[in-house]
Amino acid sequence: MGKKLKAYILSIQLLLESGEPIGNIAALKQELLIEIGFWQHERLIHLLVTILFALVTVIVFLSFVLFQNLPILLLLGALLVLLIPYIRHYYILENGVQTLYVFYEELTRREHTEGFPSSCIPQRKGVVIKPIKSPPSSGDPSP
């Protein structure tokens, strides 16, 4: 899921950074709203799963503190091994959805300012699209 979200973000970001006029901004905004809805749902599900895993981990930790049993310690280790990727995945989803919000705001700004000279458009502070990091050239060794 994380790769799919990153690929979608990259495609929208390339479109916005290309500098070329966007043909149908309203249709792109509508598509983006649908995608945002899907990713919000995915984010909610993963939030609930992450919270459940965290609660179970805390309960198992407290059980280990009370009983000091080796099988409980092994279960705690397994839950921690699973909890860390869940937190990382939720982090990716959260930041991805926030980035899609910024793209939607940028498209809205462009939709309402199309046809006006850029000197007449007030600059909004706070909404910034970070430029894409350029990939390393093929001659450079990968880190």
Image: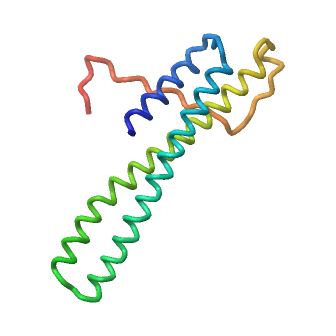
Which quadrant would the C terminus be assigned to in this image? top left
As drawn, which residue projects farthest toward the bottom? 66
Front one among 133 and 87: 87
Estimate the x, y position of residue 133 in percent, counting from the top left: 44, 27
Estimate the x, y position of residue 74 in percent, counting from the top left: 18, 71
The residue drawn where x is 26% and y is 60% is 81
55 is higher (above) or lower (below) than 47: below
139 is higher (above) or lower (below) than 37: above
Q: Is residue 45 left or right of residue 37?
A: left
Marks counted in the figure total 0
Q: Is residue 10 left or right of residue 56?
A: right
35 is higher (above) or lower (below) than 17: below
The residue drawn where x is 54% and y is 41% is 97
The residue drawn where x is 68% and y is 39% is 126
The residue drawn where x is 41% and y is 58% is 49
Front one among 55 and 117: 55
Estimate the x, y position of residue 141 in percent, counting from the top left: 23, 25
Which quadrant would the N terminus be assigned to in this image? top left
**Based on the displayed image, in which of its 4 quarters is residue 83 positioned?**
bottom left
As drawn, which residue projects farthest toward the left? 70
**Based on the displayed image, in which of its 4 quarters is residue 75 positioned?**
bottom left
Coloring basis for residues: rainbow
